[in-house]
Image: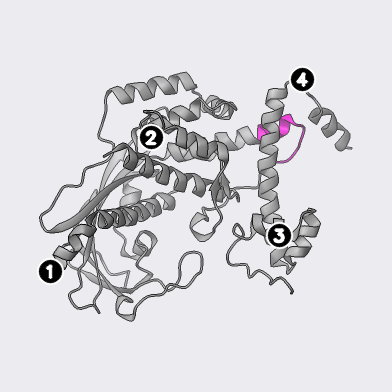
Amino acid sequence: MESPRIATVAADTSDPKAGLRAVASLRVLADTLELRQVEAALHSGMSWQQIADALGVTRQAAHKKHSKRIDPAISTPRRNK
Amino acid sequence: MNKFVRAAQTSQSLSLAAMEEASRLGLREADIDHLFLALVINDQPAGRVLRELGIDIDSARLAVEEQRDAQLTSLGIEASFPEAGRIVFHETDGYEWTSRARDLIAKSSSKGKPGDAAAVLRELVAEPSGLITDILGRLGTTSDVLIEQLDRADSSPTKSMPVATKVKGRTKGTTETFVSAPLDEVWAFLKDPARIPEWEPSIGILDQASQEATPGTVWEGVAPASYPDGKPVKIKPQFRRRSVELIAIHQPDGIAWSFGYPDVAQSNSVLTEFALVNATGGTQVRISRSWSRRQGWRGLVALPLRPFQKFLVWITLFQTGSAISRKFR
């Protein structure tokens, strides 16, 4: 089982400065993965609403964050599709 | 060159290079680590100082990647960043700086600071998170060594940007760019007519590109039908056809191409010249672009527009320079 070990190390707060900086890197990783997954979702025909539901944010929030960033070759669905 | 122009040009070239580096990683926000990578390939003395410390774009990219991965490991997360791909900046949209990177660049030109690449690098090594210090450590150097080298470079100033030599009756602009590849590779790229569309954005396709390149040879081509991001280009029919002539070739470090519009009466061709110089870790390329000024009343009308013209020349030079730099990364 990996997860308990991850939890133990991640909860290690003996060096908070290094820990905080590492968390910043983790956010960068999360952003990279989020854009990839949104692009893949649009490729597979998912709507902005479905993407937003899966991310747990509003459709407007998902659209505002990603509509300009995605690969322009993807034809994005209209609102009421 | 005044401080404002220098700071604007520095920020423009660093922004482009940093966002190109971010685009390889599938990111749309450029942070201080991408700014560091942009400085490694910068044509100004700051870039030279980094390269003279043995830091090139490949080793710098690797150090950034290892630093990020090591941080994930320190959190106990067994994951790594997705593998970097090619630069897609010019084909995509929605890029921005993180606020700390934006603030850092703004700070480099505030309160009597010069606003050049060296000023940005000084701000960068002093950034409070320690990320850059760690990356420098992975590259076998320290902020102190780097600052010392920067001081030394500042005290023996070399011309950072060439001043355009004035030619009577011609509008001319000059810029320099650093390319992280050996001179012979850059030379082979710039003398190949088939590769002109890769550095000249106004050429889409060139016919008979396999023809041998000797001075006086003329190629025909057409303007591109779409932008790199896939959007169609609107263009008047008479500007669609293009002609390209090889004007001069000085093996192995100088070449001049001329671009014209065969369907336009009184077409004014644009001369693009390249001069290559060996530099630590790559090649310094000087690019000049010039055309003859209109005679008679048209020339007088154009007179008040010269500053604007100068800016336009700089934009096209910047596009060509960054396209060449991108090809070798």
Q: Mark 1 is on which residue type?
A: Trp
Q: Which stretch appears magenta?
A: B69-80
User: Quarter-wise, where is residue A50 in the image?
Assistant: bottom right
Q: Residue at x 88, y 33 (%)?
A: A4
Marks 2/1: CA–CA distance: 40 Å
Which chain is disc 2 placed on?
B
Q: Mark 2 is on which residue type?
A: Gly
> In the drawing, does residue B119 fall left or right of residue B33?
left
The residue where tag 4 is placed is A14
Which chain is disc 1 placed on?
B
Q: Quadrant of the N terminus of chain A?
A: top right
Label 1 crowd (10 A; few <14 / some 14-19 / many >=20): few
- Secondary structure category for the residue under label 4: loop
* Marked residue nearer the N-terminal end (3 or 4): 4
- Observer-nearest of A1 and A48: A48
Classify B242 as above or below B98.
below
Residue B13: x and y, percent?
Answer: 40, 45
Marks 2/4: CA–CA distance: 39 Å
Of tags 2 and 3, the one toward the viewer is 3
The residue where tag 3 is placed is A60
Marks 4/1: CA–CA distance: 76 Å
Residue B287: x and y, percent?
Answer: 27, 51
Q: Residue at x 60, y 61 (%)?
A: A71
To the question of a shared chain for discs 3 and 1, the answer is no
- Secondary structure category for the residue under label 1: helix
Of tags 2 and 1, the one toward the viewer is 1
Q: Which mark is residue B260?
A: none
> In the drawing, does residue B231 fall left or right of residue B264?
right
To the question of a shared chain for discs 2 and 1, the answer is yes
